[in-house]
Amino acid sequence: MKASKKNVYYIEVVGRALDVLEVFLDESAPQLSLKDIAGHLNQSMNTAFRLLYTLSEHGYIVKTNKMYRLGPKLLDLSNAELRNTDLIATASPHMDALRERFGETVNLGIMIDAQIRYIDVRQSLERFRLAEVVGDSDPLHCTALGKAILAFLPPSTAHQLLCARERRRVTEHTITSLSLMKAELQRTRERGYALDLQESTLGGFCIAVPIRDESGHPVAAISVAGPYIRFNEAHVRTVVAALREVAAVVMEKLYVGRRGSARTARSRRLAPGSRAALL
């Protein structure tokens, strides 16, 4: 419940800024125009613009082609809480081990708003490295993380996601054709891992595998990425094996193991002679 504006402790300008952020929740739209936001707030265009400008300066709002969307800083604020969630907490020590073993950057990503959102990263300790930032987003079609998730979704869902955003050419190696991308996802599905062959960054190489729940649905993906001159196809077999092992452990702990524990606990509660069995 919002504080009354008559309350002596209420800072109206802060309330207005928070109202701007809440517009995106109320409208359930990823992007809104200045006119839309001003109308929703019942504020002048000038006032809404100043609020949006201030929020964008702090990273809470991003402006693109005269449209506004929520910025990555919001995820940064919640990152401390995110680190306590099961997925990140479970994957974290294995990400440390992967970086230690291969010396390259390790990424954990989930799909949000038809993009890959980095929810945890272990930066390579090398000075020349591929670096991602927690909270940042990248396209699905040109990232190994994105392709690892798309490949194991129902084809109709993958198609919708590929069409939800522009498949822009990031480098000369980026796949933008829908038919070629579907063929790439088929190859990814068959071999069980995804590759980014300088498709998102020139001189970069990335290998990713999906993390799936007990039904096989991809809930996240984990990758190892590095400069192509140092990290390339020669490392695929070893890295894929390590990533698959981590994905299997995370899946076991988050889904299979938990479900088994729940069943065991339920069996104990219903065992003959137990209090639950007598009720």
Image (cartoon, helix red, strand yellow):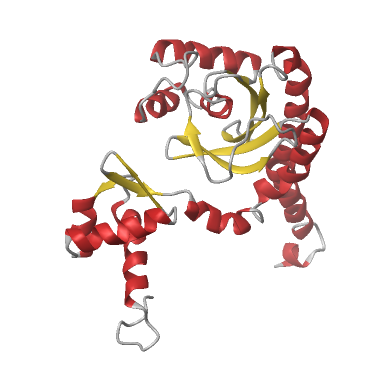
Residue 102: percent from the left, percent from the top?
79, 28
From the viewer's perspective, is residue 102 above or below residue 213?
above
Q: Residue at x 28, y 53 (%)?
A: 27
The residue furthest bottom is 8
Question: In the figure, 121 relative to 47: above or below?
Answer: above
Give the image location of residue 137, x and y in percent. 49, 38
Image coordinates for residue 248, horizontal then vertical, percent: 74, 33
Q: Nearer the viewer, residue 144 or 12?
A: 12
Between 269 and 90, the residue placed more toward the observer is: 90
For residue 276, what is the image quadrant? bottom right
Residue 236, image quadrant: top right
Q: Nearer the viewer, residue 65 or 93?
A: 65
* Residue occupying image coordinates x 70% and y 13%: 233
| Above or below: residue 192 compared with residue 268 | above
Identify the residue at image location x=79%, y=19%: 238
Residue 44 image-quadrant placement = bottom left
Count of numbered circles on the image: 0
Q: Position of residue 15 (x, y in %)?
A: 35, 72
Relative placement, left or right, of 106 versus 271 is left
Q: Is residue 213 visible?
A: no
Quarter holding the N terminus? bottom left
Q: Which residue is most to the front?
A: 127
Viewport quadrant of the C terminus: bottom right
Between 131 and 273, the one lying in front of the other is 131
Location of residue 278 with respect to 255 vertically, above or below: below
Would residue 52 be found to the left or right of residue 196 on screen?
Answer: left
Asked whether residue 41 is in view, the answer is yes
